[in-house]
Image (spheres, rainbow, N blue to C red):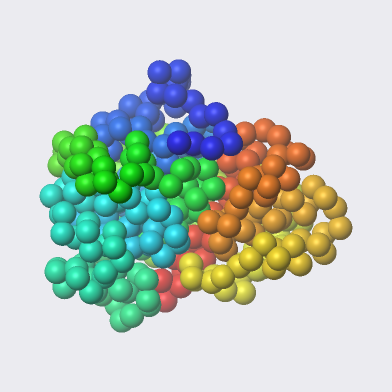
Amino acid sequence: MIKYIHPVSPKQAEGSVAEIYGQIKRDFGRVVEPFLLHSQLPELLAGAWMACRETELVGNVPRSIKEAVAAAVSTQNQCPYCVDAHSIMLRAGGDKKLAQAVEMGRLGQIEDEQTKAIVNRILNGTDTAFTAAEAPEIVGTAVYFHYINRMANVLLSETPLPSSNRLLRGGLMGVAASMFSEAVKLPKTVGDSLEFLPHADLPKDLNWARGADHVAGAFARFAKVVEIDGAYALPNEVQRLVEEQISRGIDGKIEFTAKEAAELTGKLRDEALEAAAKLALLTAFASYRVDEQTVAAFRKHYPEDEKLVAALAWASFTAARKIGSQINK
């Protein structure tokens, strides 16, 4: 379930949104909620889709490894929706044991040593477990899910399954996996999604994407769109405050409370700026702490769905970019 906003449904979609939805359905299997929530901002939808597709869905690194990275990052970010989603995708690809190990947070039970080493590298900064040629897809997958976890924690319910009943969970997981299995196994061409946005230059902090043109192209375009949407949704003072805090360090494991956010935002001395800064800071550092009151305070001054999504996207991607730089040290 999507909260707070009203996305464009596939049946209502027109123009570029309909075209993007068509490619998502073909290559992902269904137009799922993490894509739907971007739909009122078509260029942001395009950027989010290509950043996902060109890292997780295509390329030379086995998809099972990238799904394991996505699920592990989602566990780290306390995003139950995404943990379930990627457990489903692992099952769809025939990796039920790997799905169970990652879902339960039992990384030591991952049987494939390469997958285990890569997941540990992404989560814990251990010695390099992948080559320079593999880095764009693996780091890109991690960065994308540090982004989408934050969006999901704010805007989505706790599971993509129709019920959270534990007794029904196993059966529902199996049914959901069968719905995506054909698309998981479908051959895909790298770079197909790049047509949805014009060329953009790759920012220096995304240099880990160089070496894979499709990944670099996707993240350059996505970064440009997020920059534009951030300027549309958030005042300069808010962006500067959030960027300053992120530059001091963020690793996906930091605790960041509403009280700390209030202490920082109180310096702005303006109710609208404080509400925007609190939403952005909590989204960047502890998205699972964003609640109805935080969203309501923001929407009192910025009522449009588009501004809420754009603000969340900017905060989420700014944090994810910083984490990507740390992973690729």
Q: Residue at x 79, y 47 (%)?
A: 272
Q: What residue sits 58% from the left and 41% below the top?
A: 309
Residue 114 visible in the picture: no
The answer to whether residue 241 is left or right of residue 209 is right
Q: Quadrant of the C terminus?
A: bottom left
**Residue 190, horizontal then vertical, whole percent:** 26, 44
Instruction: Return the x and y of residue 154 as percentages of the image width and height.
Output: 54, 48
Q: Residue 308, position in %: x, y?
A: 63, 41
State the residue in front, 39 or 130.
Answer: 39
Asked where in the image residue 99 lies, by quadrant, the reply is bottom left
Most extreme residue toward the right is: 269
Asked if residue 183 lies left or right of residue 192, the reply is: left
Residue lying at 40% horizontally and 18% vertically, measured from the top left:
11
Q: Residue furthest front?
A: 167
Total number of numbered discs in the rendering: 0
Q: Is residue 22 above or below residue 167?
A: above
Identify the residue shown where x is 71% and y is 50%.
276
Judge from the rendering whether residue 6 lies leftward or rightward of residue 238; answer left or right: left
Left-right relation of 227 to 131: right
- Furthest toward the bottom, the residue is 127
Residue 69, percent from left and from top? 31, 61
In the depicted structure, whether residue 136 falls above or below residue 271: below
Against 246, residue 61 (above or below) is above
- Quadrant of the image for the N terminus? top left
Residue 191: tell me if it is visible.
Answer: yes
